[in-house]
Image: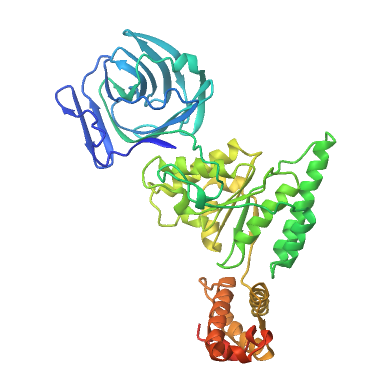
Amino acid sequence: MLIFEEHFQDNRHKWYTNDSAECTVCVEANYYTFEHKRSGGSSWLSWQSADFFYDKQEFRIHVVLEKVTGVNHGYGFVWGLANTSNFFEFVISDNGYYRISKYENGIFQDYVAWKRCYEIKHPNAVNILDIRRNGELVEFYINSMLVEKLSVDTVMQVSDRKFGFIIYDKIKIKVHSLIISTPSTETNTHQSNRRADTATTASFVEHEPPASDTLENVFVDLKALVGHEHTKRQLLSLTNFLKVQTERKARGLKTADTSLHLVLYGPPGTGKTTIARLVGRLYKQLGCLQRGHVVETDRAGIVGGYIGQTALRVDDAVKQALDGVLFIDEAHALVPREASSNDFGLEAVQALLKRMEDHRDRLAVIVAGYTDEMEYLIESNPGLQSRFSRLFYLDHYTPSELILIFKKFCHDNGYTIDISAHIALQAIFETAYAKRDRSFGNGRFARVIFERSIEQQANRIADCLEQMDDSAISRITAEDLGIADL
């Protein structure tokens, strides 16, 4: 649950502002400028009053800071602040060190003295600090890397409840955002029933496997898919590999490194989402994943509008997908060819790679998208290349396969086609297939033809329903397929 959010679009929270020979502090467009002009070891603080999270068993403080000028001086987040002589601090420096300390009655006590962290970006770069309470422990993260765990009794025995920012010596920083949240108390699993704070939560659809599923059922449904014979063989091979590795592990034998992550690439409308759901079911039945559910999202669902938001949304999506599959459709949009170095999609990729490593035994990630773009995405980052070693290519459906898909739509909706409709469909799909380009809709195109055909059929029979039996009402003819110009 989001309990405090600040992106500095204005100064609604009334942060301290000043412009003097000692400091300049002001709210600008989407950040808080904090410049300290004194030297000699002195510090400057800015804070807010709040008492809504310190007593909670779980909370998260997420701060995005950017060093602008200055050399190797500390800057960071403070909490439990009563005044300038009593507070806790989590600070980093521009030469790659961090410190966690308590300042009590003007005297410093280091819980973690200056310590090297290679995750700190420098010089003059954006860094993300996280402080997370989980029961009796408080965890400290720098750019998604866990650096320390301290007891609540050590760092949350506060004399007051203010929080804010601190800088040392002559230095200038920008604070891009501060978000404080606690785990949602909602128990609903589906996005349609899930209250989301859009700044910190991902947008997704969750698909659960059948309650009485079996491995045999998974392969029956896989076999029933139209086309994709090569992909079916690949999945069978993967199944055999996972079975053998599981048995070797049970016998105490050495096992090969097993990655559950997949790439599905090819033109649109070729059933990538359907296959991702089958893979989730497969992994569950093989004992690789406990739930086997699939959390389906895309760039819009996990990329935020501000620096730092994206990492939170990726965290949320991963959390929802644990023990199942995180399926990112049109994943190529995360790293488009024309993307700038500041594109938040790059932040999503970095955050995702870290979570894949953190939860490698509880998470499978499946990314899907167009052929050329997906190849560019995978090649754009060595971490993606190493984690996504299994690539499944899904080709265009042939005209005969499109007819089978159309017939399945008919079967699922209680319709039939006569011989004239079959001939008309063959012509429609052969023409469309011959003219296809990268945007050809494949199965989606077949669905459009079906939906328009039953609408056309309804127009044809609406005035004579009383004279028609069930078979005639359910029959699609060539007359209902007069839409070959699609």
Rendered position, 341 above or below 178? below
Residue 335 visible to an observer of this rendering: no
Going by the image, does 407 lie left or right of 316?
right
Residue 107, given in percent of the width and then of the height, sits at 34, 7
Rendered position, 196 above or below 231? above
**Depth check: 191 or 21 in front?**
191
Residue 235, given in percent of the width and then of the height, sits at 73, 57
At 75% from the left edge and 61% from the top edge, which residue is drawn? 233
Rendered position, 53 above or below 265? above
Residue 356, given in percent of the width and then of the height, sits at 58, 41
Going by the image, does 53 lie left or right of 319?
left
> In the image as oriented, which residue stretches furthest toward the front?
466
Indicate the quadrant where residue 156 lies.
Answer: top left
> In the image as oriented, which residue stretches furthest toward the left?
20
Going by the image, does 419 lie left or right of 167?
right
Q: What scheme was used to colour the molecule?
A: rainbow
**Depth check: 220 or 350 in front?**
220
Rendered position, 293 above or below 108? below
Residue 150, given in percent of the width and then of the height, sits at 51, 18
Q: In which quarter of the image is the N terminus?
A: top left
Q: How many marks?
A: 0
Residue 151 visible to an observer of this rendering: yes
**Depth check: 187 or 197 in front?**
187
